Image: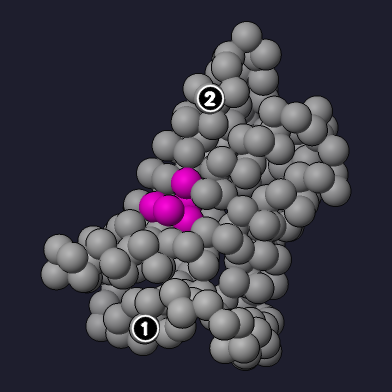
Amino acid sequence: MNQKISLAKYLLFCALGFGLAGFCWGWILYCQLPDLEYPFHYSVIIIMGLLGGLSLKLFSKSIKEISKAVLAGWLGFGIGLALGSVLVYPLSLISGFILSIIPFPLLEKEFTVLEPNIYIAAYWLIFLIIGAITGLFYALFLKLKIWSLIWQTGLGFALGSLIGPIIGNLLGNAFDSLLVSYLITFSLIGIILGLFLAWGNRYNA
């Protein structure tokens, strides 16, 4: 990335790129109601990989760098979601149990469940794995420090899955709109992921 671009501007740009991808993700899931049972969708691979990759490397003005970022995102999210779908049952049980023993009221189900009974926060371990795998591919394709980007991306995606539904539900309830809950929840998941990836991409070269 061009070092002349300020960190604040880069963070904002990446947050907007991944946030827009999350917005689209939330819209797609909302359109699947009332049959929605799982917060992941194959379109996430395309949307997050494309808009995320563009936001990470668009300032470089290099078609090669942008293409590598988009491809890394597609592969990372694709393989991550495939692995997550295989491990979804045991990981959701483990992550749900961990949340149940944390004495923090906002992590209770009433704040982190999106209707109809999609317990977003209970998938935080899956978000962590998907983020870590995606971070690995970004690191390999963009020639960044591997371990740093793995934990930063994994942590960002996992935190987003915990924070997103809380704020999404609060605002959705305020506007009495389930659509707002979905759009805010997944936009925030994308924004937080984008911020962590921007941070990692800026300082792990």
- Compared across the picture, whether 125 is left or right of 44 comes to right
**Is residue 84 part of the magenta span, yes or no?**
no
Residue 118 rendering spot, x and y as whole percentages: 40, 81
Secondary structure mostly seen in magenta is helix
Q: Amino acid at mark 2?
A: Ala
Above or below: residue 145 compared with residue 13: below
| Res 88 quadrant in image | bottom right
Q: How is the image coloured?
A: one colour
Give the residue drawn at x 69%, y 57%. 154
Q: Is residue 152 visible?
A: yes
What span is colored magenta in the figure?
187-191
Residue 43 rendering spot, x and y as whole percentages: 45, 59
Give the residue drawn at x 73%, y 57%. 133
What residue sits right under mark 2 in the picture?
8
Q: Residues within 10 Å of mark 2 (few under 14, many from 20)?
A: few
- Compared across the picture, whether 1 is left or right of 183 comes to right
Q: Amino acid at mark 1?
A: Glu
The C terminus lies in which quarter of the figure? top right
Above or below: residue 35 compared with residue 82: below
Above or below: residue 84 compared with residue 143: below
Q: Residues within 10 Å of mark 1 (few under 14, many from 20)?
A: few
Q: Farthest top residue?
A: 4
Residue 110, which numbered label?
1
Seen from the viewer's position, the closer of residues 44 and 104 is 104
Give the residue drawn at x 25%, y 62%. 171
Residue 180 rendering spot, x and y as whole percentages: 23, 61
Q: How many marks?
A: 2
Distance between the alpha carbons at the discs numbered 2 and 1: 34 Å
Q: Is residue 44 visible?
A: no
Secondary structure category for the residue under label 2: helix
